[in-house]
Image (tube, rainbow, N blue to C red):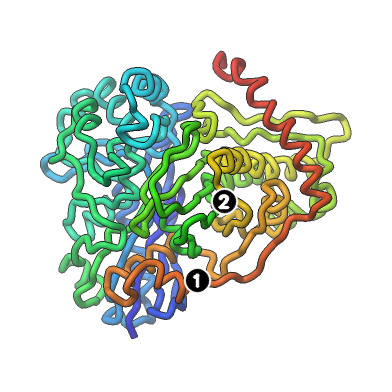
Amino acid sequence: MKTFIGIDLGTSAVKLLLVDEKGNILARQSRTYPVIYPRSGWSEQDPDEWIRAVESGISALLQGADPGDVKGISCGGQMHGLVVLDENDEVIRPCILWNDGRTAKQTDYLNRTVKNLSGLTANIAFAGFTAPKLLWLKQNEPSDFARIKKIMLPKDYITYRLTGAFCTDYSDASGTLLLDVKNRDWSTYMCDFCKVSREQLPELKESFGVAGTLKKRYAEMWGTGEVVVAAGAGDNAAAAIGTGNVNDGDCTISLGTSGTVFVSQNKFSVDGNNALHSFCHANGRYHLMGCILSAASCNGWWMDVVGGKDMDAEQSGCEGRMGKNDVFFLPYLMGERSPHNDVHARAAFIGMRPDTSRADMTLAVLEGVAFALRDCIEVARSNGLKVERAKLCGGGARSALWQKIIADVCGVEVDIPLTEEGPAYGAAMLAMTACGVYPSVEAAAAALVSTKYTVKPDEATALEYRKKYKLFRSLYFALKDTFARW
């Protein structure tokens, strides 16, 4: 029996799956690691924490299995993070993460200074992207910037340590603001502008392409034979593969630490509103994606605030208030990306009265995230995309209440995949494709992905949410100047 390992390198934990070639999940493991917050709005991680977590996780994953059956490994990972290595292959500084907000000046500078930035990269600058981080490093830590030999994205650091291959895939590279997305090559202009050379950047590969083979020391550590390691994908592209989002017009909504609306496209296009990202997809084509910086993390934060231990118990009794809640929650705990591109935005409860209950506020958190995701969907619709159905994945997707809220607020039929582990499962599918088990990502998705059930919008509740969405939309703009003065 051939088996494959899918890795999901998340913000708070790495999740690992052992999957056979028929898509059956044979084992699961998870390892957590800390996020460092040097200042308010900043977030970093030690890349070697990831390595230790992956090493420990795979060792445990293969307990009770035959390591010799493992034929392929692939990683889906948090995007945009800046990992820099020196000439001795040592990490120079902690990785600046995707949700770090320190680059407001650099982001504004890129958007003001680079003529036709969207034409060069298919995107404008957002604070989370990699290029603004490089400019920040050059301006604020010049001695570290001068030492850079290799520039990597988080999941590529895992691949590099496992294989020695210095490469990335097109989907993850799309979020650096250094890639000419349309032509699938590093942008010479942007590299020159950011003072980085092609030699410092990884080789570009398709997500299902072979990065290399597992190093001897890991093969001996885990007891495997020769193992192919695929290039992998950014977490959202990997999640899309894992949910079967591989055909033109398919949509996936993710409720992970961040939230995304991911729409596959066979042909390249750019959002004229500059609110959605135009990226390469892990199937070799393209996609448009809206990203909100805080999704399931909002629920996690709220559970911590109220001391909740059981998500289902906390949400019990909220369903009857759907569409009737007078409390609103703006989910901007880490600022916001799509569609506002505002690092200064803050989370807020609005509309509370003396009779406001804890349940009202719990419901408002879930609704606020759903409204923010609808912001992204409305931009997609304004681009002529028909978003009427979506696959739902991520930790937040396990909440039956949130499934209903997403369906009613966004006005879409919500498909719940049979297999919940989107990014890790998608990564395993990419490994299978790299090993030739399936001739294409589309073939793998057709064979391995199915729907458990579908949640349809309730017409009456959806109507109430359409009214409330108009009010939600006005709240950010009413507070925007206040946020900027904070």
Which of the two labelled residues, at mark 1 and mark 2, occupies the earlier sequence position?
Answer: 2
- Please, which residue is most extreme toward the bottom here? 1
Name the mark on residue 476.
none
Q: In the rendering, at what x and y percent does residue 103 appear? A: 39, 25
Q: 157 or 460, which is in the foreground?
A: 460
Measure the C-alpha gap from mark 1 to mark 2: 19 Å
With 294 as the anchor, is 196 left or right in this view?
left
Q: In which quarter of the image is residue 313?
A: bottom right
Q: In the rendering, at what x and y percent does residue 226 appear? A: 19, 74
Residue that mark 2 sits on: 255
The amino acid beneath tag 1 is Val
Q: For numbered disc 1, what is the local secondary structure?
A: loop
Image quarter where the N terminus lies is: bottom left
Q: 161 or 221, which is in the foreground?
A: 161
At label 1, counting other C-alpha atoms closer than 10 Å, the crowd grade (few under 14, some 14-19, many 20 or more) is: some
- Please, which residue is most extreme toward the right here? 355
- What residue lies at 28% left-to-right and 25% top-to-bottom? 135
- What residue lies at 30% left-to-right and 50% top-to-bottom? 170
Question: Are the residues tagged 1 and 2 within 8 Å (C-beta)?
Answer: no
Residue that mark 1 sits on: 449
- What residue lies at 20% left-to-right and 66% top-to-bottom? 214
Q: In the rendering, at what x and y percent does residue 480 appear? A: 60, 20
Q: In the rendering, at what x and y percent does residue 318 appear? A: 80, 50
